[in-house]
Image (cartoon, rainbow, N blue to C red):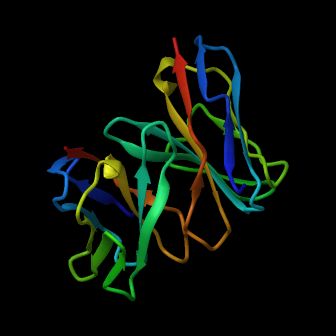
Amino acid sequence: GENVEQHPSTLSVQEGDSAVIKCTYSDSASNYFPWYKQELGKGPQLIIDIRSNVGEKKDQRIAVTLNKTAKHFSLHITETQPEDSAVYFCAASTDSNYQLIWGAGTKLIIKP
Amino acid sequence: EAQVTQNPRYLITVTGKKLTVTCSQNMNHEYMSWYRQDPGLGLRQIYYSMNVEVTDKGDVPEGYKVSRKEKRNFPLILESPSPNQTSLYFCASSFRGESKQYFGPGTRLTVT
């Protein structure tokens, strides 16, 4: 079955710098890759997603890139702000079975 | 407001005392799911339901039961809780065929 690995487990960056979180997946049939943000005391919330027919997607300061050949995808956050501090989860699924397989999460800390 | 609600938000109980965590969504979603979140392990799926009266095991179903008698509700039942079920639990829902999931606020369960 599908396995999703996420790195790093903790990432600390200076406010204003960029942050990159990487995930690799094992099932080449996976074609949907969402990123969720979990703020303290809340449930995860979808922030951006990408499908396998697209290599990159941007939404203001966040972007996701996908390398199907290498089977990895990354979340990029530019000009980080204190409100970006949270736990970020990547996931993967296929259209035939839209069960999400989750990475272990990355705790992002933005230092003032 | 579209939302997923869970009750209770916090629960401390003793080993063996049956409990139910309720989950309700007001978005007419067919798909509902329960996850547990433990440090370093990310989100692990317990059970899911594709529609009313249809439920399936996730990755970690042992010690849990669910039911889906109505579209909006998906309660999680622990018949005989044990300390290893101490965790943070999330309910999520989505339209069938869509991978974007909406999460509840979480229920923190402690079993002593």
Which of the 4 image quarters holds residue A39? top left
Which of the 4 image quarters holds residue A103? bottom left
| Identity of the residue drawn at 23% across and 83% down | A69
Count the labels in the image: 0
| Identity of the residue drawn at 81% across and 54% down | B53
Residue B86 vertical placement versus A53 (above, below)? above
Asked if residue A105 shows in the view, the reply is no
| Identity of the residue drawn at 31% across and 39% down | B40
* Side of A55 where B15 appears, left or right: right
Coordinates of residue B36 in the picture (x, y in percent): 50, 39
Coordinates of residue A70 in the picture (x, y in percent): 20, 77
Which of the 4 image quarters holds residue B98? bottom right
In terms of depth relative to the viewer, which is nearer, A13 or B62?
A13
Residue B12 vertical placement versus A76 (above, below)? above
Residue B107 vertical placement versus B45 (above, below)? above
Quadrant of the image containing the N terminus of chain B? bottom right
* Side of B95 where A84 appears, left or right: left
